[in-house]
Amino acid sequence: PMQGGVAILSEVVLGKHHNEETTHRFALSALWNLAFSEKSKQVIIGTPGLVDAIRTILHTSESPKTREVAKGALWTLGGLAMGACGG
């Protein structure tokens, strides 16, 4: 069941058709919460393109709130995700 939730959230984060700030923020917030579970963290990190998409949102979003949530998610995902995160 956990993979299904992450899959839906990753579609929102990766989807070009969902390029709305609020939608990204809520999806990232949910991923951030899921990242506190070790099992979910592995699913998130293992989802192709998802961590890169979160990094992209962190660097390109015009919303400070969305950037904060993206940074929090990456920080909680830890080492691998934070790798190229920067400031």
Image: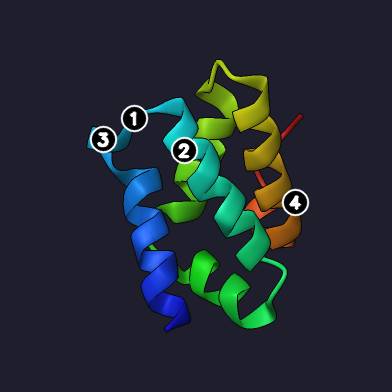
CA distance for labels 3 and 4? 24 Å
Q: Amino acid at mark 2?
A: His
Q: Amino acid at mark 3?
A: Lys
Residue 6: x, y in percent? 44, 66
CA distance for labels 2 and 1? 7 Å
- On the image, numbered disc 3 is attached to which residue? 16
CB under 8 Å between discs 2 and 1: yes
CA distance for labels 3 and 1? 6 Å
| Residue under the point 53% across and 22% down | 61
Placement of 61 over or under 27, stated as above or below: above
- On the image, numbered disc 1 is attached to which residue? 19
Which of label 4 and label 1 is nearer to you? 1
Q: Secondary structure at mark 3?
A: helix
Q: Quadrant of the N terminus?
A: bottom left
CA distance for labels 4 and 1? 23 Å
Which of label 3 and label 2 is nearer to you? 2
CA distance for labels 3 and 2? 11 Å
- On the image, numbered disc 4 is attached to which residue? 75
Q: Residue furthest toward the top?
A: 62
Q: Quadrant of the C terminus?
A: top right
Q: Secondary structure at mark 4?
A: helix
- On the image, numbered disc 2 is attached to which residue? 24
Q: Secondary structure at mark 2?
A: helix
Within 10 Å of disc 1 (Cα), the crowding (few <14, some 14-19, many 20+) is few
